[in-house]
Each structure stands twice: as structure tokens, then as C-alpha cells.
Amino acid sequence: MVDHTSTTAPETLDRWIGLDVYGVSGEEIGEISDIYIDDVTNRPQWMTITSGWFGMNSHFAPIEGAEYRSGNIHIPFAKETVKDAPSLDADDDHLEPGEETRLFTHYEHAVVNSGAAGRAGLRKYVVTEDIDLTVPVRNERAAVDGDVNTTK
């Protein structure tokens, strides 16, 4: 069994889909429906959280700062902050750069206004993958040309 505690490694995040999400004060926000991967870094960046009657409302929230605890996901944002996030088409499998900028601006503004500037910093994680790859290797070598005088 995989230990999900406090990890956002890609191989763990796919297991987050369907889990309940709770805000910074412990309030239930909804359920994770999708994970969005950044086109440039190939790292998980956003999750969509469905809420409301029959899960009809969908809201984007950053994965950064999210933690798996006790079978649920906890994020460092209030329920209202998530619900006030810019509305984007969650049916699309891709976020355009302008859409992502709007989301970053919204959540950065929320962090600054809450006085929790230190709580949503970057968290680094390492993923180990086995790959087969041919890589060119350049070696420098030295050779002596001509006669070498070894007498003194």
C-alpha cells in the first residue's frame, strides 16, 4: 500500500481523484474530479473540485500546498476562496496560459490578504523513474605525437 501522507508525487495524485477536499479551517469544499499537469514542467499544477448538487459546480485550486491526511485532501485556502476562483471551462483537458495566470493571480492575492504568505510556498518532491535512454558521451583524451626524448 502506498503512503499518501503529505505527498504530491504524480504517481500518488491519480489516487486523489474522488477524494473529499477540506479548506484551511476544516470546512468541506467538494471532491477532486481532475488533475491538470503543467505543459512546461510536466508537474501536477491544478486540481478541479466539484461541489453543489450532483457535483455541478467545478472550481480550480492549486495542488501546491495540498496534503493527504486521514483519507482526505486538505488545502491551505478557505472554501470561499476556492468558490471565488475565476470560472474556467473544466471540460477542456488543457488550460491556456492566460487562464492559468488568472488562477495564479487569484490564489496569490488570497494568500497575501489572509496574512498566510509563508503557508503556500513551493514544496519540492523527487520522483524516481527508470528509463532507457541513449546519451552521447564526450571524452577528452591526450596523445603524444612524435619522438619523446627520454634522455637527460
Image (cartoon, helix red, strand yellow):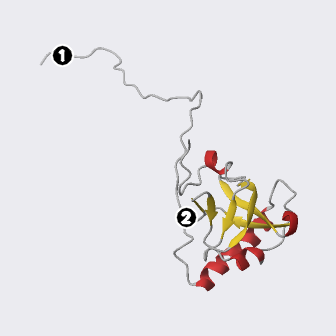
Residue name at image x 26 percent, y 16 percent = 148
Q: Residue at x 14, y 15 (%)?
A: 151
Q: CA distance from mark 1 to mark 2?
A: 62 Å
Front residue of 146 and 80: 80
Residue 43 place in picture, x, y as percent: 65, 52
User: Mark on residue 150?
Assistant: 1
Among the 4 quarters of the image, the one containing residue 32 = bottom right
Q: Nearer the viewer, mark 1 or mark 2?
A: 2
Which mark is drawn over residue 57? none
User: Is 87 on the left or on the right of 105, as rendered?
Assistant: right
Q: What residue does disc 2 label?
A: 122
- Mark 2 closeness class: few <14, some 14–19, many ≥20 residues within 10 Å: few
SS at mark 1?
Answer: loop
In the displayed structure image, the side of residue 3 where residue 140 appears, left or right: left
Q: From the viewer's side, name the closer residue of 125 and 71.
A: 71
Disc 2 marks a residue whose amino acid type is: Leu
Q: Earlier in the sequence, mark 1 or mark 2?
A: 2
Placement of 54 over or under 131, stated as above or below: below
Is disc 2 placed on a helix, strand or loop?
A: loop
Residue 74 visible, this orientation:
yes
Q: Amino acid at mark 1?
A: Thr
Q: Is residue 152 left or right of residue 98?
A: left
State the image quarter where residue 102 is shown. bottom right
Q: Nearer the viewer, residue 17 or 95?
A: 17
Q: Name the one closer to the observer, 98 or 47.
A: 47
Residue 42 showing in the rendered view: no
Q: Residue at x 84, y 64 (%)?
A: 55
* 137 lies above or below 16: above
